[in-house]
Amino acid sequence: MKSSRIKNSLLGTTLALGFISSTALGADKGIKMGDSFPDLNTFALEGNLPEALKGKVVLVDFWASWCGPCKDSFPVMEELQTRFGPKGLVVLAVNLDEETATMNDFLKKHPVTFTVVRDAKKKLVSTVNIKSMPSSFVLGRDGKVAAVHRGFHGQETRAQYVKEIEQLTSASFASKQP
Amino acid sequence: MKSRFLLALAAACLLLASGCANVKPWERSVLADDTMRPDRNPLAQGFADHTWFSREASSGGRGVGGGGCGCN
């Protein structure tokens, strides 16, 4: 009698543990719209972050050299930086390659003028917990996430970027004027 | 007896669950490698297809498109 009780309690504990671990695996953590984006200075990213990100509209893009759509997104991000840079946009590409050399090889073949840093320890990406590659976050001047993009879908994503960035840059400028 | 069976079942489930790997999107560089594509070599794929449809009499049955008419 006693042993069956022990067995039952053991069984209950095992099932409970299984349930807890399965729910923990499926937990949907990460950054969503309206959240404050983490302070990039606290993640020991390789490379130089732009000095003044505060008060800027920032497009944070997570990419890797092995990811095809990431490669497709590069010319678009370059265009955005050129077009909206003077209005206060900063494009910041966060590389997630295993090795710096792989990233550098890619950048030699596809040179860009926007800032590229590397999350070598994968601390930032783990905090942000992206769901697909590439993933990007458009941050308003207040540092809050105004839009989240999963993947890069060519002209469709480009049009969304332009719309969001136009809105964010012009709205901020308008609010600054007396 | 029943509880022992359930216990064994639960333990087996947990053991199997521990074999599941949660690969994050940024950890898929090896999976994204060209060598992971089963059809990376068109010639080898052609030979394999030929062997397959000769054996199975199902020309074009692999992948999308084509039927299984066996005409060839």
Image (spheres, coloured by chain):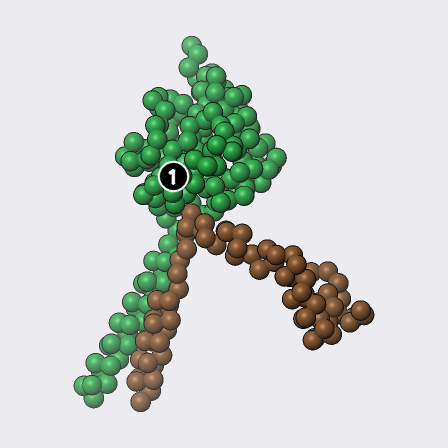
Chain colours: A green, B brown
In this view of the protein, can residue A139 be seen by the observer? no
The x and y percentages for residue A57 are 43, 25
The x and y percentages for residue A97 are 41, 43
- Residue beneath label 1, please? A100
Residue A11 vs residue A173: left or right? left
Residue at 52% x, 55% y: name it: B35
Front-lying residue, A14 or B62: B62
Question: What's the residue type where badge 1 is placed?
Answer: Thr
The x and y percentages for residue B19 are 37, 67
Classify the position of the N terminus of chain A by image quarter: bottom left
User: Dividing the picture into quarters, in which one does residue B56 lie?
Assistant: bottom right
Residue at 80% x, 69% y: name it: B72
Subunit under mark 1: A
Q: Farthest residue in the left direction?
A: A2
Task: Tell me the SS state at disc 1.
Answer: helix
Front-lying residue, A24 or A12: A24
User: Dividing the picture into quarters, in which one does residue A117 lie?
Assistant: top left
